[in-house]
Image (cartoon, rainbow, N blue to C red):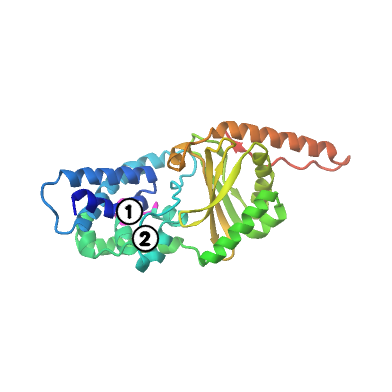
Amino acid sequence: MSKVEEFEELRPLLFSIAYRILGSVSEAEDAVQETWLRFAATTTLPTSTKAYLSAAVTRISIDVLRSARVRREQYVGPWFPEPLLNDPYQDPERSVELAESVSVAALLLLERLSPLERAVFVLRQVFGFGFDEVAEAVERSEAACRQLLVRARRHMEAGQPRFEAARKEREELASRFFDALSEGDVAGLRELLAADVSMAGDGGGKGPQLSRSVIGAAKVAQLLAASFPAMTATGVTFEAHELNGGPGAVFRARDGKVLHTLALDVADGRVHAIRLVINPDKLGHLGPVADAWAVDRETRQLMRDRNRQRTRREPAGQAPIPAPTRPST
């Protein structure tokens, strides 16, 4: 095969390695492109093209991650990985590891690791590279890589949920969740949420987001049931879609442009976390991005109007229904 053909055959693997190290679709694509430029410029053919390219994309990703970690420490609000609709790399022998490692929960755990720990964990634990290949990729001894893997596993295992739902169970629960959301059914939503469920949004200071995480089934159910009907009234729609290997949805404004994504973290038969990515910089790979600020203003105005109407209908002496928590601008 030609260099181009060899590279294109391995591109899905290279992207999948880079995405798990970086948690960013755009940065992973850039890392893969830089890998191609280096491969195209080399005058000698490597013994193993797969090993050479995997090592190259890993080193590039480590360098990018070291720089990105500084930016993430200064990030406005919660940082979530860029939503991934489909993982381009598939390996039946490692399907479980691949699916688990791309979940939002796993990527957030990976954020706790150092760049080297993260790279070693991804190459060895997720993709099954030999320690000799891992050592060459991260430019450390095999003994050092074994120690890095031990530390990485310890961090990852400490943060994993006690029980992860099977795929079919996740899909069924997600279907019930989105049905209840569409109907504004507070009771239906509350039944599906864990008692300590959390809901947070990643706007990065560039999109409307919750002023703080909303915690607790009652509060989250009330907020969702109050805000979604108002969003629907502005023309917002959603498409249930697998995100990062788990249940989620892509929300669109009335013009069809991407508004935000919503990912569900399901375990032990309940939704334990709801994470929204609203930052427009993280949504461009999904299509044209909507003006989330305009939709937010229109939605909040509708919620205020509806709340005033409810208040006027309350019998004398009865406390008005409190306004739901609103995104901060």
Q: Which residues are magenta?
A: 111-117
* Residue 112 magenta-highlighted: yes
Q: Residues within 10 Å of mark 1 (few under 14, many from 20)?
A: some
Q: Is residue 188 visible?
A: yes
Residue 274 picture location, percent across and down: 56, 51
Query: What residue is shown with label 1?
Result: 12
> Picture coordinates of residue 156 (x, y %)?
40, 61
Residue 140, located in which quarter of the rendered image?
bottom left
Residue at the (64%, 40%) spot, across then down: 231
Q: Amino acid at mark 2?
A: Gln
Q: Is residue 105 above or below residue 230?
A: below
Residue sitting at the far right: 316
> Tag 1: residue type?
Pro
Q: Is residue 314 magenta?
A: no
Looking at the image, residue 41 sits to the left or right of residue 280; the answer is left
Q: State the image coordinates of residue 280 (x, y, percent, origin top left).
A: 47, 37
Q: Does residue 116 appear to the left or right of 284 in the view shown?
A: left
- Is the C-beta separation of discs 2 and 1 under 8 Å? yes
- Left or right: residue 30 versus residue 160 is left
